[in-house]
Image (cartoon, rainbow, N blue to C red):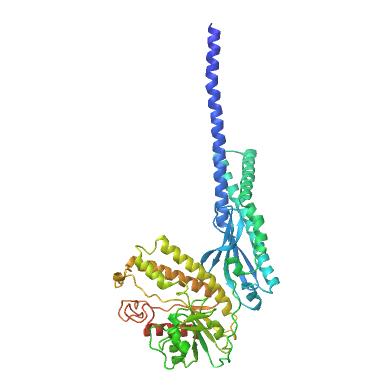
């Protein structure tokens, strides 16, 4: 009886022990798996963050090839970074990690011009696609090395913490690295192997970013404008909207509301230059600069086509962007909304800015085809508001709303400046500091003036002086 009782007691004691042992083993396995997954996620995240972009060059272009932030979707567009703005690519890629292509520099010449539109430029286009594909392969080869490096360091730290030695440490680190790389390749391998083929088929920068293909602007028929020394292209700011009419206006001058205070007129008068002001109220890049514009009951030829009739022009000044973004509409939306940074207003602005960025790329490329290789100056927009001034509160523009509008204006100016820098053009931002709307001696037309928020005569003079300093090389 005692022997049976003793045996039963031993069995009953052994069962909980075995259960606890199995439980500990399961916990160790789960803990090990958890640590391995954390190491895997950390290694891949580290590699995607620190792997340097691969810079490739093709026919005067410089493009940095990297990765866009990972996504949970298995197929979709990559990213193109143009002039600081991130735009979805027109082409789709397979996998959660997709290419990001950043345009950093362009040196325009006859060969590079073929990259901005389709046509008989197959060798150039193939060079572009091949360079991008090569850059992508290099990027992922480097990413794999960084994943391995991060995994070795993290697994080595785990082995040291667990006090593993010798062969066991080698097994843990080697096996862990193999697992991490297997997961890395499973997640991004599809993209790594399919993206080069997709990139190789890219035939132009326009097609990559979804820009509507724009044929080169043809020269407007007519006699050469041989005596023109400088040309102004742009919108109502450059036209001098709100000022007195010109002394002997043409029909186009009247239709475009060009005035005698426009900075083009000031530059001509002060420097005794012959300046052809082609700017027109309401002009945008597609309708006005590189395309025809209907204004004041007339159909006006593209400003760029007229500019090509001036073979001796030494300078071209461009002021464009506000109409493309429908700036006046944005101000009205802001004034009517409870907040200017709500989703609706923000989405509206971002869509307009993305479209403008694509159009601006096309314009900048076509400016490089002007005869005589003139100096190109891109005007940024002046700052018309001061958030500390409260004279616009009655119109619904509180200080917070003005701050939001100023941020949007800065985003536009950043695109203008970055684009000019990418193409090697000059850029100018007139300084209206201390002379914004509602201040003493304001440079901006007020709410009761003929063209609210446009520069007045003093403001146009400041713009003219800024452009003159840029053209003459003054600091």
Q: Where 250 falls versus 399 (above or below)?
A: below
Q: Percent from the top left, x then y, of residue 239?
A: 44, 83
Instruction: Tell me the residue at 29%/73% (across/down).
Output: 391
The front one of 219 and 126 is 219
Q: How many marks?
A: 0
Farthest top residue in view: 1
Instruction: Tell me the residue at 57%/35% (across/down).
Output: 29
Farthest right residue in view: 123
Asked whether the viewer can see residue 473, the reply is no
Instruction: Tell me the residue at 42%/72% (across/down).
Output: 327
Q: Where 370 falls versus 338 (above or below)?
A: below
**Which quadrant holds residue 410?**
bottom left
Farthest front residue in view: 297
Q: Where 460 falls versus 223 (above or below)?
A: above
In the image, taking residue 5 as reference, residue 59 lies left or right, namely right
Q: Percent from the top left, x then y, of residue 231?
A: 51, 86
Q: Percent from the top left, x then y, of residue 33?
A: 57, 39
Asked whether the viewer can see residue 230, the reply is yes
Q: Percent from the top left, x then y, of residue 186?
A: 63, 48
In the image, taking residue 131 as reference, residue 259 lies left or right, namely left
The front one of 209 and 132 is 209
Instruction: Tell me the residue at 65%/78% (across/down).
Output: 110
């Amino acid at each position: 009886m005692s022997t049976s009782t003793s045996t039963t007691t031993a069995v009953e004691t052994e069962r909980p022990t075995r259960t606890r042992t199995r439980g500990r083993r399961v916990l160790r396995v789960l803990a090990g798996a958890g640590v391995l997954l954390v190491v895997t996620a950390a290694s891949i995240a580290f590699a995607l963050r620190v792997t340097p972009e691969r810079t490739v060059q093709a026919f005067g272009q410089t493009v940095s090839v990297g990765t866009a932030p990972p996504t949970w979707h298995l197929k979709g567009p990559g990213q193109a970074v143009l002039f600081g703005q991130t735009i979805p690519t027109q082409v789709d890629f397979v996998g959660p990690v997709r290419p990001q292509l950043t345009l950093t520099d362009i040196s325009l010449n006859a060969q590079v011009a073929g990259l901005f539109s389709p046509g008989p430029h197959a060798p150039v286009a193939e060079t572009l696609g091949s360079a991008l594909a090569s850059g992508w392969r290099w990027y992922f080869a480097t990413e794999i090395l960084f994943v391995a490096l991060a995994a070795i360091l993290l697994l080595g730290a785990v082995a040291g913490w667990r006090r593993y030695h010798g062969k066991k440490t080698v097994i843990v680190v080697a096996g862990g690295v193999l697992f991490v790389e297997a997961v890395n390749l499973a997640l991004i391998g599809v993209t790594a192997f399919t993206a080069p083929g997709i990139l190789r088929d890219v035939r132009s920068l326009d097609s990559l970013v979804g820009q509507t293909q724009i044929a080169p602007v043809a020269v407007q028929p007519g006699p050469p404008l041989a005596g023109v020394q400088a040309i102004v292209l742009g919108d109502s700011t450059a036209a001098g909207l709100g000022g007195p009419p010109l002394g002997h206006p043409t029909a186009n001058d009247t239709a475009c509301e060009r005035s005698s205070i426009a900075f083009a007129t000031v530059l001509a008068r002060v420097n005794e230059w012959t300046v052809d002001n082609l700017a027109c109220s309401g002009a945008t890049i597609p309708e006005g600069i590189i395309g025809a514009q209907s204004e004041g009951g007339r159909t006006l030829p593209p400003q760029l086509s007229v500019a090509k009739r001036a073979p001796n022009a030494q300078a071209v000044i461009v002021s464009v962007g506000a109409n493309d973004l429908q700036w006046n509409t944005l101000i009205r939306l802001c004034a009517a909304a409870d907040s200017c940074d709500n989703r609706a207003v923000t989405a509206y602005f971002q869509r307009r800015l993305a479209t403008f960025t694509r159009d601006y790329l096309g314009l900048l490329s076509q400016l490089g085809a002007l005869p005589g290789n003139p100096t190109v100056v891109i005007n940024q927009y002046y700052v018309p508001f001061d958030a500390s001034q409260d004279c616009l509160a009655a119109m619904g523009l509180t200080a917070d709303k003005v701050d939001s509008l100023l941020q949007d204006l800065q985003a536009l100016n950043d695109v203008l400046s970055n684009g000019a820098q990418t193409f090697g053009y000059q850029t100018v931002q007139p300084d209206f500091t201390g002379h914004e709307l509602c201040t003493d001696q304001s440079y901006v037309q007020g709410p009761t003036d003929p063209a609210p928020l446009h520069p007045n005569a003093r403001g146009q003079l400041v713009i003219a002086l800024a452009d003159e300093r840029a053209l003459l090389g003054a600091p």
